[in-house]
Image (cartoon, helix red, strand yellow):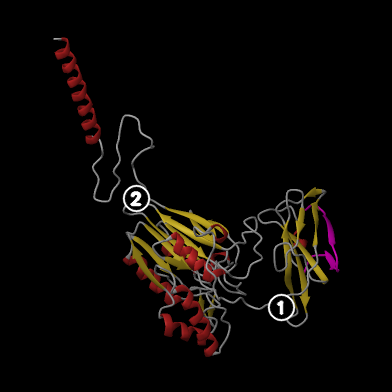
Amino acid sequence: MKKLLLGGSVLAALLVAVSLSQSRIAAVPKAEEGGLQIQSDAKNPYTHLKLNADPEQFQFAIVSDRTGGHREKVFSRAVQQVNLLQPEFVMSVGDLIEGYTFKEEAIKEQWDQFDGFVQKFEMPFFYVPGNHDITNKVQMQKWGERYGRRYYHFTYKNVLFLGLNSETPPDNVSAIDKEQIAWLKKTLAANADVRWTFAFVHKPIWTAQDLTKNGWGEVEKLLAGRKYTVFCGHVHRYQKFVRNGNNYYQLATTGGSSRVRGTAYGEFDQIAWITMKKSAPIVTNILLDGVLPDDLKLPDTDEPGTKRKILPTHPAGGRVTVGGQPLAGGTVALHKFDTEPEKFVNVCDGRTDDDGRFQLTTYARFDGAPVGEYAITVTKAGQSVVPAVFGTPTTTTLRVPIREGENVMKLDLPAR
């Protein structure tokens, strides 16, 4: 009898175990083929099972200015780095070739080289013209022969993308002309119900004094009432603007001329990475230095850099006080008078730290300044501490000679 009872107990335990096992298997959430499948218990080694994979979500990348004295192997390697990230497509904000020539052979050679780079993208690449790309009527003609339209649009997952053109030489440089405004009006009317709008233009022409004259005022009127984001380049320095409740991004460089002093100066080589969520985009700035393959080695390329005439520089820096107090977050710039155009030319600059100290940069990070006589300007954005007289090279009373060896400046300015 005892053996019979013991056997019954064992059998009951086995049945309970099988029942529990089956309940756990049954608790595995059903998923579409290829979807997430995992055992789910009362306690689990994960936070939740809601994947970040909304069908309306997508990612794209933006490359910025490559020219104005481009540096060797940066843009061509950036193509490989974007391929590592695998966005769905890549946008641009212009200045793709050096340009500034009427010579058809030189124009063809530069575009052939650039096209050779972007054809290595594993996803679509969308061109946007900059002032280097369509400097004159000859370059405009060559653009048309290769790429057709200078402005265009497309939609993807109910999001509108506008590739705008801020250059129509020789009459409308740094402007959106009337013909483009008329096209934009029709395009926006035909896409009134999109969930977001992105605009890509080379120059930050919204910073001009007369937005009626350059057409941007009309662009903003047409965009009013919709959710949108604007991207541009041209200045080679990252900056974020907020206008009419919308974000405008001025990107840094992707190989273009830059002193590359880092994020404090907005000077770095980058890819802008945009994740379009269901409700709004997330903008992330990815520095190229941080995008590496699994062997930590980027493939070599044969992209040459622009040869520049570089003068010897000498260490130069100092400290600025205003009314006896250190000037934090100000900009000190040295300007040399050029007799041929008869105007001052900015040669180098530096930003002041919390103690008012600064180091000057001419070509590369904190390399100093060339020998010469300079006018000094001191400014600080969005404030009234520094007297206005020191804000321009034609009015400032500050002068400094740069000599061989170390140059230390002590700039004690009166309070405003």
Residue 379 position (above or below residue 109): above
Q: Are marks 1 and 2 in contact (CB under 8 Å)?
A: no
Question: Closer to the camera, 281 or 298?
Answer: 298
Q: Where is 36 relative to 409, above or below?
A: above
- Between residue 388 and residue 312, name the one nearer to us: 312
Residue sitting farthest toward the top: 1
Which quadrant holds residue 409? bottom right
Which x, y percent locates residue 412? Answer: 84, 55
Q: Position of residue 44 (x, y in %)?
A: 35, 33
Mark 1–mark 2 Cα distance, whole angstroms, equals 51 Å
Which residue was labeled with disc 1? 309
- The amino acid sitting under disc 1 is Lys
Residue tagged 2: 53
Residue 396 visible somewhere in the drawing = yes
Q: Is residue 281 left or right of residue 241?
A: left
Residue at figure coordinates x 34%, y 50% from the top left: 53
Residue range (magenta): 394-416
